[in-house]
Image (cartoon, helix red, strand yellow):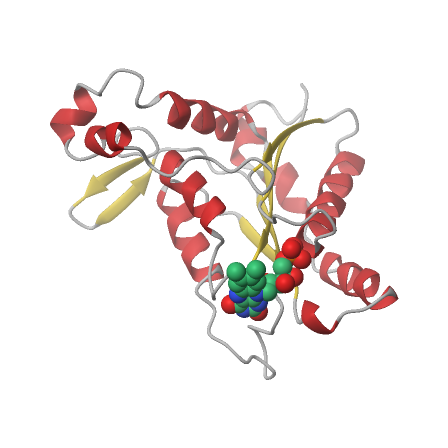
């Protein structure tokens, strides 16, 4: 069985801290699962369109979801199938204005679909996607955790909640913070420090891997 990694990046910059961190995570996963396959979705270099009128119309009610505007769900379906094919997902993202960049939000707007990736119940959304490890590599110019935090964090709670709503609950956040003050070798040191927190054991324990027999 080939171990499939979906590698997503969101920074518009090539020499980006979140890209460096997400690439290092992918390398670690490939070391743990030799011969693994990497699917790439570079949202920073090739942003998705925002939700179109046809897509929004289809998503506007159960009736329209049952009879979608022709073609309006094609992109959504393609992106959801990329998620479903992945044994692990790695997302590199900057913090933009206290939360996710709009390119990542545009991806979420396509993969969160009632009746396809989540069900709406009286008590909230229930995920329809089998859980699998999601590693999220964050870069922020300032600091958002710990005693030195100088801003609120609407990024990690948002991603935990929205991805959890579709069933992806095994999420690890790794971050390089205060990138505004990182120069030269300090950037590599910050990346190594962020990577030290990674837990790769969840990959072997993933329900999706277990369902496939774990080999
Ligand atoms: C539009 C924009 C908004 C930003 N907002 C924040 C912010 O709210 N908090 C923060 O700490 N850094 C903010 N930054 C700085 C980036 O998070 C920082 O430069 C980070 O290293 C970018 O990620 P990258 O290195 O992967 O490109 C912002 C940068 C941009 C371009």
Q: Is residue 72 left or right of residue 107?
A: left
Q: Residue at x 59, y 30 (%)?
A: 209
Q: Residue at x 87, y 65 (%)?
A: 185
* Residue 174 showing in the rendered view: no
Where residue 11 appears, as percent x and y from the top left, is 61, 49
Q: Residue at x 62, y 68 (%)?
A: 141
Q: Quadrant of residue 30?
A: top right
Q: Which quarter of the figure is the N terminus placed in?
A: top right
Nearer to me, 215 or 70: 70
Q: How many marks?
A: 0
**Ligand 1 position by quadrant:** bottom right
| Image: 42 above or below 124 | above
Q: Is residue 185 left or right of residue 155?
A: right
Nearer to me, 204 or 181: 181
Q: Which quarter of the figure is the C terminus placed in?
A: top right
Task: Tell which residue pokes out farthest to the bottom in this image.
Answer: 147
Where residue 60 appears, as percent x and y from the top left, is 17, 35
Q: Residue at x 59, y 84 (%)?
A: 147
| Image: 144 above or below 40 | below
């Amino acid at each position: 069985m080939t171990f499939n990694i979906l590698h997503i990046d969101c920074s518009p910059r090539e020499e980006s801290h979140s890209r460096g961190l997400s690439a290092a995570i992918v390398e670690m996963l490939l070391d743990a699962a030799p011969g693994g396959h990497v699917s790439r979705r570079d949202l920073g270099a090739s942003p998705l369109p925002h939700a179109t009128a046809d897509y929004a119309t289809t998503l506007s009610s159960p009736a329209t979801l049952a009879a979608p505007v022709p073609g309006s769900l094609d992109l959504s379906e393609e992106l959801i199938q990329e998620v479903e094919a992945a044994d692990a997902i790695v997302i590199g993202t900057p913090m933009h204005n206290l939360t996710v960049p709009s390119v990542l939000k545009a991806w979420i707007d396509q993969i969160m679909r009632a009746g396809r990736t989540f069900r709406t119940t009286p008590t909230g959304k229930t995920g329809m996607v089998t859980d699998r490890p999601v590693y999220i590599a964050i870069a922020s110019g300032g600091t958002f955790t710990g005693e030195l935090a100088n801003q609120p964090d609407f990024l990690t709670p948002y991603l935990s909640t929205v991805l959890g709503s579709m069933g992806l609950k095994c999420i690890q956040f790794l971050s390089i913070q205060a990138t505004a003050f990182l120069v030269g070798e300090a950037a590599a040191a910050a990346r190594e420090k962020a990577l030290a927190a990674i837990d790769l054991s969840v990959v072997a324990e993933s329900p999706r891997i277990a369902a496939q027999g774990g080999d």
